[in-house]
Amino acid sequence: VGELLKLAVSLRPRKIVVGLGGSGTNDGGAGLLAALGATADVPLNCGGAPLAQLTAIDVGPARAALEDVELVAATDVDNPLLGLTGASKTFGPQKGADDNTVLALDAALEIFAGAVGRHPNGKDPAVALGAGAAGGLGYALMQLGATRAPGIATVLAATDFEARVRASDLVVTGEGCFDWQSMRGKVVTGVATTTMPTARPCIVIAGDVLVGRREYSALGIAGAYSVAEFAGSAAKSMDDPVNWLQNASARVARTWSR
């Protein structure tokens, strides 16, 4: 992400929006800062573990690289960087971290945040909502002056989504697992609530569906289709996901074609 930001800055934009979703790292955005010129007494681009030995870091060059750009961190995650609801505790296990590794990563990020310190504006991004997004990437962006914006709302506005819906007959959205978390401001919710006033049906195709019809109907969703159900089990659907996704899509087409 840092390398992409560096490239984007070279094009002299006025505004850059960074979407924060899943990530393969839990480094507080240290790698991003390094790509933009930050230096430290430990490697910044080797994940979260080396940060436990960090004693000195200079993020000045990274801040300077983006000082003339309006930076926006688009995320629907409100986790801070550290603690029980922080990046390591919440998202570390999703990346294979066991309990001991989670504690070690959280401690390393605490050292990292302590070394970076407060933003020049006096605020501490480590405690900000969304700082823990994408393995702590939100924190690094906030250290560079980014403001946080709701992820799905930002995307829908940027793509003129409502106008596209009004020009359509059917809206199909998706999710890995359509569960209660999906209904807390994530993509499916944003798409459904935007579609509802247009009177177009909104359909969800998901890897699995764990929400009942009554609950998702309240969001304006007309139907939800589970790929795992078509396959017979989640495990079987993962063996041939394209085939089972095509099966689910074909059912939607047959059901909702005029």
Image: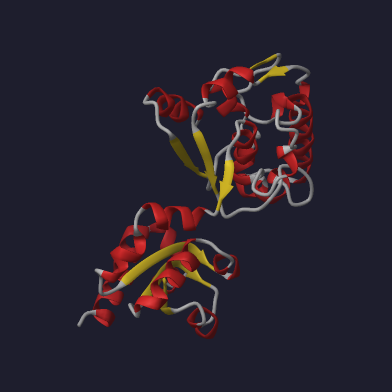
Vertical relation: 38 (above or below) 157? above
- The reply, left or right, for residue 48 in relation to residue 63 is right
Q: Is residue 61 above or below residue 4?
A: above
Q: Which of 178 and 69 is in front in this view?
A: 69
**x 60%, y 34%: residue:** 145
Residue 130 coordinates in the image, percent (x, y):
64, 48
Quadrant of the rendered structure where residue 37 is? top right
Q: Residue furthest bottom?
A: 214
Task: State the colouring used for the structure image.
Answer: secondary structure
| Front-lying residue, 187 or 99 | 187
Give the total of numbered labels: 0
Outermost left residue:
258
Image quadrant holding the C terminus, namely bottom left
Q: Position of residue 49 (x, y in %)?
A: 70, 29
* Horizontal side of residue 108 vs 25, given as left or right: right
Above or below for 105 versus 54: below
Nearer the observer, 255 or 202: 202
The residue shown at (50%, 68%) is: 189
Say which residue appears at 71% left-offset and 45% top-offset.
Answer: 128
Left or right: 25 with respect to 58? left
Image position of 174 with respect to 25: above or below: below
- Which image quadrant is residue 122 in? top right
Could you say where residue 256 lies in the image, as x and y percent from the top left?
27, 80
- Considering depth in this image, is 232 or 63 the residue closer to the camera? 63
Q: Position of residue 155 (x, y in %)?
A: 43, 53
Q: Quadrant of residue 62?
A: top right
